[in-house]
Amino acid sequence: MGKQRSHIKIGVFIAGTGHHVASWRHPQAQADGTMNLSYLKGLAQTAERGKLDMLFLADSLSIDPHSHPNILARFEPLTVLSSLAEVTSNIGLVATASTTYGEPFHTARQFASLDHISNGRAGWNVVTSSIPATGANFSKEEHLEHGRRYQRAQEFVEVVKGLWDSWEEDALVRDKESGVFFDPDKLHELNHKGEFFSVRGPLNIARSPQGHPVIVQAGSSESGQQLAAQTAEVIFTAQNHLAGAQAFYRSVKEKVASQGRLPEEVSIMPGIFPVIAETEALAQEKYEELQDLIIPSVGLKILSTAMGGVDLTPYPLDGPLPEIELPESNAVKSRSQLIKEMAQRENLTIRQLYKKVAGSRGHHIFIGTPEQLADRMEEWFTQKGADGFNLMPPLLPEGLELFVGQVVPILQERGLFRREYEGKTLRDHLGLKKP
Amino acid sequence: MGKQRSHIKIGVFIAGTGHHVASWRHPQAQADGTMNLSYLKGLAQTAERGKLDMLFLADSLSIDPHSHPNILARFEPLTVLSSLAEVTSNIGLVATASTTYGEPFHTARQFASLDHISNGRAGWNVVTSSIPATGANFSKEEHLEHGRRYQRAQEFVEVVKGLWDSWEEDALVRDKESGVFFDPDKLHELNHKGEFFSVRGPLNIARSPQGHPVIVQAGSSESGQQLAAQTAEVIFTAQNHLAGAQAFYRSVKEKVASQGRLPEEVSIMPGIFPVIAETEALAQEKYEELQDLIIPSVGLKILSTAMGGVDLTPYPLDGPLPEIELPESNAVKSRSQLIKEMAQRENLTIRQLYKKVAGSRGHHIFIGTPEQLADRMEEWFTQKGADGFNLMPPLLPEGLELFVGQVVPILQERGLFRREYEGKTLRDHLGLKKP
Ligand SMILES: Cc1cc2nc3c(=O)[nH]c(=O)nc-3n(C[C@H](O)[C@H](O)[C@H](O)COP(=O)(O)O)c2cc1C
Ligand SMILES: Cc1cc2nc3c(=O)[nH]c(=O)nc-3n(C[C@H](O)[C@H](O)[C@H](O)COP(=O)(O)O)c2cc1C
């Protein structure tokens, strides 16, 4: 696996105006970015100029009017990636789709179709939809509970892969002379019968260029990591420190191995939120400029959500965090505890605290020069904290343009990143074999 | 209504190698047409050169290996139209999607997304999936019965339209100065609770350029026509004779009016299967050439399906149709009766009979010169048998190129068809107002 570990993998998580919650207010921001196709085309082409491995589009199936403006109104990922496929030729195209509110037949088909349209560049980020309100958009009384969502996800992925295998590569003979259109021995029913699904198949689309579009996963719970170890070929994660990233890396690679898979079949790509400028001081200034754009009510709302819903509106913004009861819920408890401890340790006002929490929403913040960012990436890569990174530029297109223009050349100079695409498909870029 | 009735509406039903069941075997056919994106782009661009109103893509969610090769393996319509949107700029893009195996939230979003991507050129052909085997691909024990499918379809369309209305046109304010991203008074929950669906909304995509993508329907049963009268803006139908087309036209327009809608809000577009050549004799020859390419076993299979599943394999192909019992099932009974009567009346062998039934699968066959086709279209249009036509060329791209190159100029000369697109959206082309 020499080749695979000699190059850092790099994806870019495209999110409207950027990943900073207040990015849309920045003077340079294209405020309608999430719904502006020519703007998104420009981002895709910039990423391809930088020879990045892939574009990533997140998704959700319900909106909270108080959430990040980037996710309130946006394109549906598979349609927009089909359109971006036309203005790019090499970069991978990864769309998010939920297994909780979808049907495996539709999902298998849409991704196979995108894979054909893009000549083998499709990837599927498998998510289970964590927002309970989503059920209300899909005639469900209740959102499936976390463990059940992952059981359904596992079966869902199995069915999708089975459907992708329903046509063999050379099944479509199309022999005009004899009148044989396809070889019936190479067309297979699936006849899946499981707990959640029963699906006969075959799929009504020819086997796609990659055989299987690439499977991406970002689960962080025990069952999330289990699903990833079983099926994912790329794993996204939020890691803030090298030590933590290394522990996650080791643990996931072990889980992968214990599934009988090769650890190098899975690329671990933590998110990184890079604020880059010529000097560290200028980068810090740039970050502060974004931080100052956070509307207090928005910052407070994000902080209170991160702390399990506590109401902080009665307290002065420039005073300390009051002594409050933290919620009992398991999921957010540790996070709210950590936030509370940080507030006490660093003696922060409520305003300072929401800025810490809201800006990058928990992702690895890097603030410094292009050279320093290359160092950080090299360190994480060589020290086995990461096989690559999922870039989450705070402000777009600026953050992506700087990365491509100034960081990529340094990585190339160091022999850590490709100078040209060597293959055509996303599997080629990631060094994955074709199933 | 002057403008709307002065121009014939013309769509083209894009189906791989063409609508003749044996078209793929023709020496000129691009046998991999259904799965060849650059070929489909060429067709879309030819149709746009001809200033046609729209492209139409059919769909199904299960395959019968014995069905028309064009529908065995094909792109998923919404992804491929998103890609075709990039290589065209005016022509409408109509995709088929089923209400029986979909979720209104997904469908509303995908079509809104296509409408944004194409700058207002999306249309939705609402179908209920008539093939019972489809349920087996979607974890259903049974295919919903015909009447229930239409009840579900009606509620489905209502929910989709409601979701399209969840964002008002100017809801996204994006005022950087004040930090107001959207106007909460212009974002609406739907809170639909019905027999089949409960959907809260709002949709997570901004209102699309057309407000509502255009609704197309092709139901022919009583409940199918009822749904069309309530919701459709374009109606596809198979009509073989002017008198029948006129009766259908009158009856549908009356049904539309009785729903409190204006009859001109609905365009009735029968399919037409035009075999065109310089002389009638050459056109007839061209048709025979295609007919002779039908593989006997395929032709026999199609004939036997059309006759409700009777087994004709024991009888000589060049002998007469034997005296057989016709099936009791309501749906196919009248069709099989008609076929049997035709065989007796015209004294046809089994081979001659399957050729009649299989070639165009029941659609209006026209065989003649470009001038004669223009006459036929003008006659149906002025005599109120049609507001326009859905072209189903037997062989592609030839049939579309001939139509665009030789029939369109005649219709333009007669003032029956546009010389240039006057508007940008599909609603503009069809003379429909924006909801
Ligand atoms: C980089 C990254 C991107 C993610 N994108 C999405 C997304 O687009 N949609 C979604 O519903 N969840 C997304 N998630 C959430 C994960 O799928 C997962 O639900 C979350 O990390 C919690 O883990 P768990 O599901 O194992 O509890 C993302 C997570 C990360 C780290
Ligand atoms: C031109 C035309 C195109 C059609 N396209 C589709 C299609 O793509 N998918 C489908 O399931 N049915 C399609 N149909 C079938 C109709 O939706 C409808 O089911 C059929 O005409 C029978 O009518 P009924 O549903 O009212 O019984 C089409 C029909 C016509 C006339």
Image (cartoon, coloured by chain):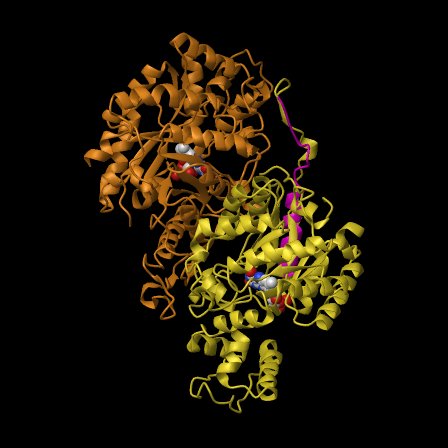
Chain colours: A yellow, B orange
Number of numbered labels in the structure image: 0
Q: Ligand 2: give its quadrant.
A: top left
Query: Does the segment drawn in magenta span residue A157?
Result: yes
Q: Residue at x 27, y 32 (%)?
A: B249
Residue B73 falls left or right of residue B278: right
Residue A310 visible in rendering: no
Against B198, residue A349 (above or below) is below
Residue B360 visible in rendering: yes
Instruction: Compare residues A133 and B277 and report the one nearer the observer.
Output: B277
Against B352, residue A294 (above or below) is below
Residue A141 falls left or right of residue B31: left
Q: Residue at x 45, y 49 (%)?
A: A38
Q: Residue furthest left?
A: B2
Q: Quadrant of the N terminus of chain B?
A: top left
Residue A288 falls left or right of residue A177: left
Query: Does the segment drawn in magenta span residue A182?
Result: no
Q: Which residues are magenta?
A: A151-175
Q: Residue furthest bottom?
A: A323
Instruction: Compare residues A286 and B312 and report the one nearer the observer.
Output: A286
Against B243, residue A160 (above or below) is below
Q: To which quarter of the image does residue A409 belong?
A: bottom right
- Residue B334, position as x, y percentages in the image: 41, 28
- Residue B313, position as x, y percentages in the image: 59, 20
Against B17, residue A118 (above or below) is below
- Residue B122, position as x, y percentages in the image: 39, 43
Q: To which quarter of the image does residue B54 belong?
A: top left
Q: To which quarter of the image does residue B431 belong?
A: top left
